[in-house]
Image: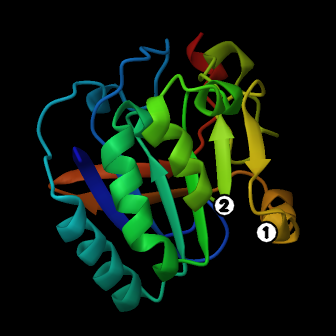
Amino acid sequence: MRIARILSPVHALGPGERVCLWVQGCGRDCPGCVSPELRPAVGGETDETLLAEILRRTAQANRCHGLTISGGEPFDQPQALLALLSQVRDQFDDILVYTGFRLEEIRGGSCGPAGRDCLAYIDVLIDGPYLRERNRPDCVLRGSDNQTIHYLAPALRPRYAAYLRQGRVLECFSHDGAVILTGIQDRRDEL
């Protein structure tokens, strides 16, 4: 799997203390993308078994119970995503994945059989392309109001409802000599 970065503990991309993994590579090319540096599908190659161990150790060290996977586009690497999710499913109480694909597309096979199989390991899926002109401050956990939060594990809905009431959260991290801002930003002023 091509990985751009792993940060923890993160609070801005889901409830509780989380490990967040950003994949490298995205073919969607959404105007106004918050992470254009993650578009090229080059570099960051990591074996999924090694990556699962890194995530496990990171979670233990930082007492994280949630995992958020973003990008780039995780479903551009469906076989690698499936291999990773199957290895870490038992390590996290809550797995949230962001994707520019729609849930119906994934279920319909747009990401191949591996993409469809990933859904069995995901608790919450936030789907849909980012549309800068539809970025609104009340879209907590979503970049734009066309994106949908799907509770594939309905029991998590109350936990997320409490988290969503707090509004958007931003956090800063230092990573590889750069400052990384995590969370969903209000970017309508860039139109």
Residue occupied by mark 2: 123
Q: Quadrant of residue 174?
A: bottom left
Residue 173 visible within the image:
no
User: In the depicted view, which residue is nearer to us: 30 or 166?
Assistant: 30
Residues packed near mark 2 inside 10 Å, few (<14), some (14 to 19) or many (20 plus):
many
Q: Quadrant of residue 164?
A: bottom right
User: In the depicted view, which residue is nearer to us: 108 or 17?
Assistant: 108
**Residue at image coords 30%, 25%:** 39
Mark carried by residue 156: 1
Mark carried by residue 122: none
Where disc 2 sits, the SS reads loop
**Residue at image coords 37%, 34%:** 72
In screen coordinates, is 30 left or right of 26?
right
Q: Are marks 2 and 1 in contact (CB under 8 Å)?
A: yes
Residue 76 visible within the image:
yes
Residues packed near mark 1 inside 10 Å, few (<14), some (14 to 19) or many (20 plus):
some
Q: Is residue 63 above or below residue 135?
A: below
Q: Position of residue 173 (x, y in %)?
A: 35, 61
Q: Amino acid at mark 1?
A: Leu
Question: Of marks 2 and 1, which one's residue comes earlier in the chain?
Answer: 2
